[in-house]
Image (cartoon, rainbow, N blue to C red):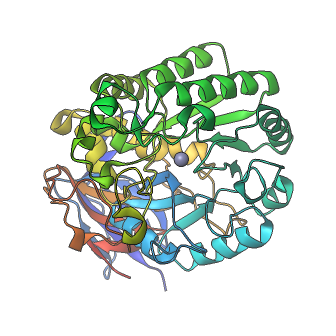
Amino acid sequence: MTDHMLIRGGTVVHRETTTRSDVLVVDGIISLVGEHLDIPAGTTIVDAEGCWVGPALVDLHTHLREPGGEEAETVASGARAGVLGGYSAVMAMPNTSPAIDSSAVVAQVLALGQASCLDVAVAGAITVGRLGERLAPLAEMAELGVTFFTDDGTGVQNAGLMRRAMEYARGLNVVIADHCEDDALAGDGCMNESSLSSELGLVGRPALAEEVMVARDLALAQHTGCELHLLHLSTVGSAALVAQAKQAGVNVTAEVAPHHLLLTEELCREYDPLYKVHPPLRTANDVEALRMALRSGGIDAVATDHAPHAPETKDRPFAEATPGMLGLQHAFALTREALGGADADPVLLFRVLSRTPAKIARLTQSDQRRGGHSAHGGEIAVGEDANLVVIDPEGRPVVRSEVLASKSRNTPYEGRTLLGAVRHTIVRGEIVVNDGVAQR
Ligand SMILES: [Zn+2]
């Protein structure tokens, strides 16, 4: 039986422009885009009046915690948070227990992803156990379709090992992604190193810890020709280094997290561990530079670094609490707030939250491997897979812990009123969020 769905009355957000159009989806594929479409009887109508219709979002940086951290999140619960946030695909980070450092664990997480309500791409670890000592079997994981490798949670500290990883990755045509923090410089720091950290009596993690590794990785990428992706950049200096490297022709992309676009170190004043994250919240000056870099294309994408944590590890004194915060469910409105609120350009928002991350994750074409994922971040055009989101730009959802689909509650945005609400999320032509409610 053919399945027809009409997304009616919305403003379609294309790559460069927007148009007022209806979108007809037949059996999971966009089959008509235009005005006043003739539709067969029995067509499901999705109301998009007054809404933006764009490609569903793609997250490059999601901690789904499975296997090993199921008390904080599972692939199923993280996926539900994702679709409620308008996502159709996420990249699962490998700092699980065991780490995703072999084809066996890759296959396990891919299978969990296939059973979830969105497409899960898997990042493999660069080193065995993420210990930074010897290379993980990248080729074996690449055979299963893994194209993105990182030891996220920590950076690869040994420059010689990172050079070998990049040389190897180049041959395999895969991306090396790094969490840039030099352990020797970051030390036991738990917030940004500044006059404020001294005032609060907390040990600081200097901007330098990040920038030293960014500079090192850029030099290694230039030397090896490897495609490099820099995770969650947080400083004005990092943004400048990446802009310079791009001008020099280095094959690099970079992401920034919504919290680094919105929150500053000032929030650490109350010693509330909800504001502890690595890299740490920085200064207003850094926030402004990151926003500018995102607008200019110096930084390519927004990635959530969604990091669920159970209360046993998070509700502790600031210095001892585990770093990280939730991000998936409200990333669109938070990014919009950072990029000008009601004035933010939807074309830019869908570029940095969907189209560019899909390219970096190599999710723009469907692939029989990786659990057989569909194509994401594409044009709203005939023949494309229907991974779509309908967002009410006037919606004003309030972040409340009871609305969070995550198994964890560590959001720094409790009580915040956002501008823009995800109304419907469509994954492979299926309505997985209808009027703001997850369907499974
Ligand atoms: Zn990280």
Q: Is residue 19 visible?
A: no
Instruction: Indicate the position of residue 262 as horizontal and vertical percent values.
Output: 28, 38
Where, quadrant-wise, is the C terminus in this rendering? bottom left
- Tell which of 139 and 381 is nearer to you: 139
Instruction: Indicate the position of residue 335 as horizontal and vertical percent values.
Output: 31, 42
The residue at the point 84 percent across, 57 percent down is 137
Instruction: Indicate the position of residue 416 as horizontal and vertical percent values.
Output: 16, 53
The residue at the point 19 percent across, 49 percent down is 393
* Left or right: residue 13 compared with residue 221: left
* Left or right: residue 191 compared with residue 404: right
* Left or right: residue 359 compared with residue 222: left
Q: Is residue 294 visible?
A: yes
- Tell which of 231 and 312 is nearer to you: 312
Residue 267 vs 47, above or below: the answer is: above
Place residue 109 in its image quadrant. Answer: bottom right
Residue at the far bottom in the pictured view: 1
Place residue 218 in its image quadrant. Answer: top right
Place residue 95 in its image quadrant. Answer: bottom right
Q: How many discs appear?
A: 0
- Tell which of 177 and 46 is nearer to you: 177
